[in-house]
Amino acid sequence: MARIADLEYTLAVMGWDQETYMPEKGADFRAQQTSTLSGIAHGMSIDKELGDILKKLHKKKGLDKKQQRNIDESYKDYKQSKKYTTEFVELLSKTTSECFQAWQKAKTTNNFKLYVPHLTKMVDLKRKEADLLGYKKHPYDALLDQHEPGATVAFLDVLFKDVREQLVVFVKKIAAAKQNSDAFAHKHYDKDKQWKFGIDLLKQMNFDFEAGRQDISMHPFTTSFSSQDVRVTTKIIENNLKSMIWSCIHEGGHALYEQGLPKEQYGLPCGEAISLGIHESQSRMWENNVGRGLPYWKANYKRLQAYFPEHLKNVSLDQFYKGINLVKPSPVRIEADEVTYHFHILVRYEIEKALMDGSLKVADLAEYWNAQYKKYLGITIKSDAEGVLQDVHWSHGSIGYFPTYSLGSFYAAQFYHQANKDVKGLQQHIEKSNMLPLLKWLREKIHKHGKFYTAEELCIHVTGEKLNFKYFMNYATDKYSAIYNLKK
Amino acid sequence: MARIADLEYTLAVMGWDQETYMPEKGADFRAQQTSTLSGIAHGMSIDKELGDILKKLHKKKGLDKKQQRNIDESYKDYKQSKKYTTEFVELLSKTTSECFQAWQKAKTTNNFKLYVPHLTKMVDLKRKEADLLGYKKHPYDALLDQHEPGATVAFLDVLFKDVREQLVVFVKKIAAAKQNSDAFAHKHYDKDKQWKFGIDLLKQMNFDFEAGRQDISMHPFTTSFSSQDVRVTTKIIENNLKSMIWSCIHEGGHALYEQGLPKEQYGLPCGEAISLGIHESQSRMWENNVGRGLPYWKANYKRLQAYFPEHLKNVSLDQFYKGINLVKPSPVRIEADEVTYHFHILVRYEIEKALMDGSLKVADLAEYWNAQYKKYLGITIKSDAEGVLQDVHWSHGSIGYFPTYSLGSFYAAQFYHQANKDVKGLQQHIEKSNMLPLLKWLREKIHKHGKFYTAEELCIHVTGEKLNFKYFMNYATDKYSAIYNLKK
């Protein structure tokens, strides 16, 4: 298992270098090198000898709980991996590459039709994949389980019903209220100063710079080469202060989770993150619940003003706080605020589910997309490039991924609610730039366990109950009712 | 072969990251990951199926010359690799690790005795390795061949005899002449400006920044992930202008060789550098023959003065040129000038030869070292830390490596002599900052062939004769007689 992890983490180094420092012409051989390494890693992960050992250990009695969990998870993964035939893997790889190219061209030329045959092939293939993997109720369940083990249509339908019925109504109230401005964030903010402020924030979060670093990349991301070497990246846009700040805090949240995983469990499930949803709960808690909160800026606004006195001297903390918390429907997911964001996911969730059960055809997708954006966000999509073509995910075959973003926010709200009960004076600590009590709580409650719990078990372990949308709804209602002066 | 190369280049990425950006705590897992990958690569390179194919192709008729060369070299490498038993590899790895630690401790505490038992073990092991690999005349030949295929004691004895008889005498003449000063190089030179000037020099050399980049590391080095992605590093010392400039040009020379290797021969011998000696000829030609020459500074001195007007306005080009070409015996190899450098190698060559044939014991090494430094450099070594303990190489088991440094300079002189005959007005081109004619000549004569020629064959192919020390001797005599006003 450690040897497989060695290869997977090596692939992560290759990927990190590719996104940060690799010169242009290096791409072709890098792709080849990565593919060779992936093939070797995959071969090791479906090795018969490994399977035999896991099978034997799986039946063995007298293992402690952590050992048992490691064996069970590894054996499950092994059996899942074995379900893929070589033909299927190769076809998926070929289709992905073609589909991605078609998506790029379709997006650049705003021509959805170019994408239709390729995405149709991809969806057919993913339906085959669901059959290959097996599922109890809905073919989409098989794909969801890959990104968020345990998640099902039955589980998500409940959550997104709440989004549809409660959050849509609440955003309409906000839309009717007096609007705030974030004009201050779009002056020219010097790159170097932004960089330094971002590093300050990471340090304050207790990101361990002896076990990680930050660099620049086109799209911010976090990657890990072990819990002892976790890399984050950020992106600095000189006329948009928001981009760097919250990407830094967001990736910092991911990174703290990775740095908190137990190193003695390297290569084993209990040394790994639970799921994308739980990972995203860590990034979003720091980004939104903490990093877009008033106490956080009571701690940091003067510091930011000191970097940019000319820009911010006439912007009060209250104006700043309101300006960084605008709620406003917009057509592009990655630019959405923390509330309307979930409408973007809702649309994608409904679409993926329908594509997988065959009730929606790719050919009808653009029309459907635009109708749903009108319905939930009240927005008229002006072009497919900005509409159905905006995300790369489907072209990569990533179906079942989007819901984990919303799950992340919902878990974050529920965990943070609990943290405020468990940690005395948490908000006062944050106001004084002391992030350690929160981090200690996260380490103890979440990080150190790795995959010892499933997402559902963890949620019960930490908060005493299963994931419940009400925590997010309460968080959003309290915060934005105050910001927009709404009556509850 | 391409798959093996994919792994080797991946290891190079891991190594590069380790030396440039890896945070401190990442070291342990990185070592483990690297070891796993090395093991897999080694396993592939001694795979029986590969051996069978190579054996079959080796006998096959009708291959073209390049194919034949690729097969011959690969088969030779394969057979060499097969000679190592697993026990031997593991023992060597363990001994290296212990020996390196002992060297570090011995150097820090200036206590050679601590190192003696470990280095003795290492030397014994390297003598066993020579037996394992086989040799015709001298056990040292087996080790030399690993770093410089084809090099033997018989071949090097001739060269170093010339060094001893001609160069030692010449340096004594220089020592008796009026000395120049390089005080100007030790003012405070701003890091960022040094960096920018270094990048200018690399660009001027036609280093392809779309197929490579420069970063900072503790010790400058060049590494390659394919001919399309070649990384150099440099080191900037603020009170020593020389360090950055000539490390930049030196590594740039290595890098141009790597970038010039034919990419369609990826993973095959004809896509690889010939030997360490030939590699070093490329770095040293650019560093010394070109980069420490007067024409080069006619092209670049004004540029440098423009970066540092305060520092250099009162230093004439002539003073600068003389200051960057001081010849002066000193105890430390890596700080030596391009002439006395070879005395350092001479000492090491004599020692390695004697250790390998058993005529010198490790226990007597420090005394012997000091005596040779007195004899060839006229220097009294004040401490073992600065003497016999100065280099890390032996602790790594690198015996047979040092001579390639001198070979590099000697090849460089011979090649450069030929370039000046072949390329019309080469010195005038350089004076005008036009490095392209030289690069084109190197590409055509050396780079594009990869390992198609052996070092000896290449030398004949390029210059019409075997390696001959007289070219270096003539180069040094002409250049330094002028600088030091010596009568020839």
Image: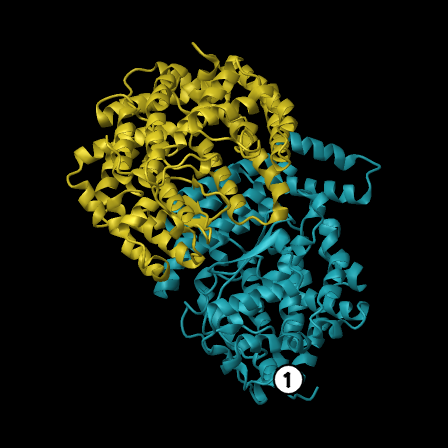
Chain colours: A yellow, B cyan
Q: Nearest the camera: A454 or B472?
A: A454
On the rendered structure, is A389 left or right of A200?
right
Q: Nearest the camera: B145 or B23?
A: B23
On the rendered structure, is A351 left or right of B466?
left
Judging by the rendered image, the residue that carries numbered circle 1 is: B483
Split into 4 quadrants, where in the image is the N terminus of chain B? top right
Q: Is residue A452 above or below residue B237?
A: above
Counting other residues with Cα less than 10 Å from the Cα at mark 1, is it few (<14), some (14-19), or many (20 or more)?
A: many
Q: Nearest the camera: A124 or A162?
A: A162
The residue depicted at 56 percent of the width and 76 percent of the height is B306
What SS does tag 1 mark? Answer: helix
Q: Position of residue B262 (x, y in %)?
A: 72, 48
Q: In this view, does B383 lie above or below A112?
A: below
Q: Residue furthest top?
A: A136
Q: Position of residue B151 (x, y in %)?
A: 67, 57
User: As shown in the figure, which amino acid type bears the numbered disc 1?
Assistant: Ile
The residue depicted at 71 percent of the width and 72 percent of the height is B430
Q: Position of residue B357 (x, y in %)?
A: 56, 57
Split into 4 quadrants, where in the image is the C terminus of chain B? bottom right
